[in-house]
Image (tube, rainbow, N blue to C red):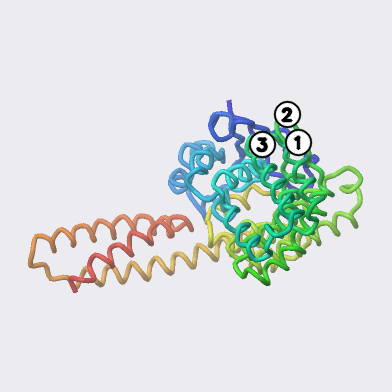
Amino acid sequence: MPIYEEMFYLGTGRYVDFMRSSLRRNLITQTDKLMLIYAEISAQTQEIVAGNDELVREFGKGFDATNRTLEWGFSHIAEGLSEISSTIEDLRADFNYNIGLVIEQMQIQNKLINKVIEKLDAIHKTLESPLLTQAREFYRIALERLQKGLIDKALEALLKAEEKNDADFFTEFQLGKLYLYGIDEDDNVIDLKKAQEHLRLAIRYGKGELKVLPDFNRWLGEACFHAAIAYYVSVNEPGIKENPAEVKRLLGEAYNLAKESCEIYPQISEAYYHYAKFSALLGDAENTISNLEKAILMDRRYCIKAEIDKDFDAVRPKVIELYEKLRKDSEIKARDLLEQAKGHLSKIYVYSEEGRQVREEAKKLIHDAEILIEKNTYFSNLDAIPYLKKAIEITSYLL
């Protein structure tokens, strides 16, 4: 049976309890045991963003059209992780804190970090220093252990690597993420203060690496993103959640780090989404809407994610206004393309069987697009656009 969870938001229980409640050791293969977010989609959001048909197309069997309920699972992530680079920017709206450890294991398997480390080691002439060589060896041992699911042993090796080289980005980066996401059925090494400390160090050292390796912004941006989460999830801790000043301070740290992540590496849509979350919690409606819009334009499912995320409740009317704007913009674009497609079709003079086939195909594409546009939701307008572009493309050479 699936396990239902809510998203983590301000006012829920402790972060470690949230992580513990959704433990799934064999996430990659046991898709029937995946954590699912269960939520009801409001009638208002269905009218503006996506109706039943659009939600079924987007989420398949996960959306119950009769009850307007969504089970947002992560089975397709499990199926696809081995085929993609398993990065935060690849997952987009599917990212959730409880798959953080799985992402780390898949990045190790895909050797995503190896080439970057090899470049840096060559630049810094690491192999010429016995101490730095030992540090790197402990780091590699840690990754091997982490890939096997030996969280405690991976932590031991990382700490030894840090003893040998206390100014290495990737050692601090992995330590920070392990203290942030490191929990399974055997071990729990989550320590939010240590996660904050090590990710802060990673950011400091990453800025130095950026000077010698310009494309290092991808890793530095991710370090800022995870650091933002480490501060944010601390707000529900005992002794903190009862202290409004401390909650505001932690949210301010998270806000600044998410902003920095967006500036350093704009490809992480989750950074924009979190920047919007923190802005909403701090009462900054303008930044909430501008950053949520950026996230949605990268992955439209953020409309649904924000719908079920209670951190946006304080600015919910502004979020609905954004949805209305997105619907209107998409409608204008779709109708402009519809006129172009119809214009192409009206000018076609058919002299061959091939031409007749193209005309019939274009007519079918336009017809299907018109049905979608008439529904006039954000998703339906977006779904119509590829049909119209295809109709324009296949008729262009006949003009």
Residue 324 position by quadrant:
bottom right
Q: Are marks 1 and 2 in contact (CB under 8 Å)?
A: yes
Which residue is depicted at the point 70% across and 33% down? Answer: 184
Location of residue 376 by image quarter: bottom left
Residue 67: image x %, image y %?
54, 36
- Residue at image coords 92%, 45%: 239
Name the residue rendered at 77%, 48% in the picture.
233
Task: Check disc 2 and give the amino acid type.
Answer: Asp
> Which quadrant does the C terminus fall into?
bottom left
Tell me the element at label 1.
helix
How far apart are the alpha carbons under marks 2 and 3? 21 Å
Count of marks placed on residues: 3
In space, the residues marked 1 and 2 are separated at their CA atoms by 9 Å
- Give the number of the disc on residue 5: 3
Is residue 189 rendered to the left or right of residue 219? Answer: right
Q: Where does the image place residue 165, in percent across and percent down from the top left?
A: 78, 55
Asked if residue 272 shows in the view, the reply is no
Pointer 2 local density, CA inside 10 Å: few below 14, some 14–19, many at least 20: few
Work out whether residue 275 or residue 132 is closer to the camera in this orientation and state it. 132
Given the image, on which type of amino acid does mark 3 rest? Glu
Circle 2 residue: 186
Q: Which mark is residue 299?
A: none
Q: Say which amino acid is labelled 1.
A: Asp
Q: Earlier in the sequence, mark 1 or mark 3?
A: 3
Q: Identify the element where label 2 is drawn.
A: loop
Label of residue 152 in the image: 1
